[in-house]
Amino acid sequence: MTTADGSGPSTDLGDVAARILAMVERRAEATVVVSRVADGLTRFANSFIHQNVVDEHISATVELVSEGRPAAASTRTVDDASLRHMVDAALAAASVRPVDPGWAGLCPPASAAARDAHYDPATAGAGPDERAGVVSAFVEAGGGLEAAGFCQTTAVESVLVNSLGHRLEDRHTRAAIDGIHRHAGSDGCGSRTSFRFSDLDGEAAGKQAAGRARAGAQPVELAAGRYEVVLDPRCVAYVMDFLAIYGFNGRAVEEGRSFASLGEDQFDPSISIWDDALDPRHVGGGFDAEGTPKRRTDLVKAGTTVGLAHDRRTAARWPGGAESSGHAIPGGATTGAVPVNLFLGSAGPDSDPEALVAGVKRGLLVHDFWYTRVLDPRTLVVTGLTRNGVFLIEDGQVGPAVSNLRFTQSPVAALAPGHVLGVGDDGALGPGGLHLGENHAPSLRLAQWSFTGNASG
């Protein structure tokens, strides 16, 4: 049954999009996106579930250009009066804005390579009972340790249409468990993310978190300095966001703000980096904010920088010509194109993570980063902190826990030729450091990582 504001389950997204385009008429060129979102979140702390919330809504956005002047507006109420107010607000905003010299026109009609590549009906239908089951498994795996975190399920249906007759539809789902166990003031983390709810193994994630928490009790303090490191997949996924927005972004390169240089061997030959929204190991939709269908984009092949992320704007200006790679993001006219389905993998044979540790004479095993900021976008020097488990490695054996450390390091320099000593076979989705989404990454053994502070300062 349709609710009074038109946001009930029987509301047809395509019909809403068509109504918006009809309201724009010939007054502007327009791209319209209408989405139905169902987001369920179960949060727990002190080993008890304390919150279950569900947000179900329909949102509509119109991005239009009138006489070269762009504007956008959105609403979560899709009755005719609200939609007309949204369109009128966008047109009014456009009338007082300057002409945009970078406007590259609407996306022409095109078909997506694969619809619903990351959609799972069971995930879309998962409710609080299912999420509570995963949380229970995570908590019980701690054997009495204090646990906190969340389990989330999301389902999104979207329709995109524009004034050129372009139309795309997509559905995708996402499920995640992310939490910590605490023991004697020491935290350990464990997580799983997939577009399939059935892939969430709360027990395995909980055992991982509990094991790290117990091992991390009574940490020793280590002097700041450069150390060989084995970075957990979560750490690698975290820093990949910085590579995406500050590095492989076509606009950043165009403006001279990026390290990326096409054709140069900027990374170790063991490293390849690519973006692929259709790979079943990732999550997310099949087209970008401008309506360009997403496809695999290689960024680094065997250490050589070979590609960049483009939206229609940077592609139109690129010397020698380029095409949009399907990486436009909402509000990206100033940000540029950003790859949000990143993978980092090995160009050669992978190693068991234990083998990576076994090769280290003296170094650190790091499980998580946080609170990271960019100091120099051009060289991509960033500073941040470790958390949720740092351990000393001596003679190939994991030893005592180490107090958290501050680092100041360029991930580009850390991945430079000759600096990658091993790539793990444990690739997994982990949260990025700039909240762009998840990145798929393995463990890495690196020759050095610069730690510039310890618990004493």
Image (spheres, helix red, strand yellow):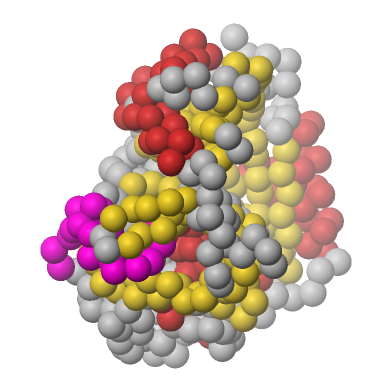
Residue found at x 48% / y 63%: 239
In depth, the one of 75 and 298 nearer the eye is: 298
Vertical side of 274 occupied by 438: above or below: above
Residue found at x 35% / y 68%: 362
Left or right: 58 in relation to 312: right
In depth, the one of 369 and 123 nearer the eye is: 369
Magenta highlight on residue 321: no
Picture quarter with the C terminus:
bottom right
Left or right: 141 in relation to 359: right
In depth, the one of 436 and 125 nearer the eye is: 436
Vertical side of 210 occupied by 2: above or below: above
Q: Find residue 46 and report its image quarter.
A: top right
Vertical side of 293 occupied by 129: above or below: above
Left or right: 243 in relation to 349: right
Residue range highlighted in magenta: 348-365
Q: Find residue 13 and report its image quarter.
A: top right
Q: Find residue 256 and report its image quarter.
A: bottom right
Picture quarter with the N terminus:
top right
Please provide percent x and percent y for residue 254.
53, 85
Left or right: 117 in relation to 185: left
Residue found at x 53% / y 50%: 219
For this orientation, the residue located farthest to the left is 349
Residue 146 can be seen in this image: yes
Magenta highlight on residue 357: yes
Q: How many marks?
A: 0
Residue 200 can be seen in this image: no
Please provide percent x and percent y for residue 252.
55, 79
Please provide percent x and percent y for residue 80.
73, 30
Please provide percent x and percent y for residue 261.
41, 87
In depth, the one of 118 and 416 nearer the eye is: 416
Residue found at x 30% / y 83%: 417
